[in-house]
Image (cartoon, rainbow, N blue to C red):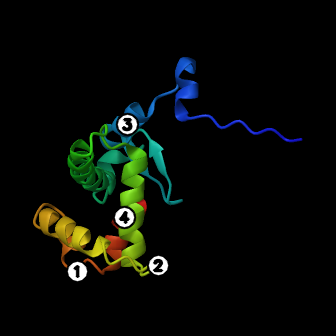
Amino acid sequence: MNISILFGSGVSFRTGLKNVNEITTEVLEGNWHDHSDNTYYKGLHPTEGNRPNNKVPHIQRFLSYLKTVADQYFASHDRSEANYEDLYYLCEQISNDLKMEFDNPAINPFISQVVSELSGNGYQDLTSSYNSSKATRYADEA
């Protein structure tokens, strides 16, 4: 007989590991850098001053916008603030739609809202044509 025990993320609280709210803050406000292996690492890039195309600030602003929208939704449903898991889910929904992975007619108005709200705020490459590969990359990389 095999026994399985399922634990929530709170089980690690006493170990001093970060909770979901701390992880979310770290993702949105922490120093990160993208690497050529398509991975994001904690801390500034060693050659940060020489990197004009650092995508991290754009991605953090994109995620912060998504968090604002999600927080408004959750507040109206008596739920706590959005966390990094919720932001991942939103990004996944956007990415899946833009890549035409899944047919989800309900997500299209949300994507149109995101494009409209972010237009002219440093996201011209995202908003010029939200079917572009750059739009998909923002959602994927976030």
Q: What residue type is labelled 4?
A: Ala
Label tally: 4
Element assignment for label 3: helix
Upstream in sequence: badge 4 or badge 2? 2
Upstream in sequence: badge 3 or badge 1? 3
Binning the other alpha carbons within 10 Å of mark 4 as few (below 14), some (14 to 19) or many (20 upward) gives many
What numbered label is drawn on residue 26? 3
In this view, 90 is above or below 79:
below
Element assignment for label 1: loop
Residue bearing the label numbered 1? 129
Residue drawn at (47%, 78%), measured in percent from left and top?
101
**Residue 65 pos. (x, y %):** 22, 53
What numbered label is drawn on residue 101? 2
**Residue 120 pos. (x, y %):** 10, 66
Upstream in sequence: badge 3 or badge 2? 3
Alpha carbon of mark 3 to alpha carbon of mark 2: how far?
30 Å
Q: Do the residues labelled 3 and 1 touch (CB within 8 Å)?
A: no
Element assignment for label 2: loop
Q: Which amino acid does label 2 sit on?
A: Glu
Q: Do the residues labelled 2 and 1 touch (CB within 8 Å)?
A: no
**Residue 34 pos. (x, y %):** 43, 53
Alpha carbon of mark 4 to alpha carbon of mark 2: how far?
14 Å
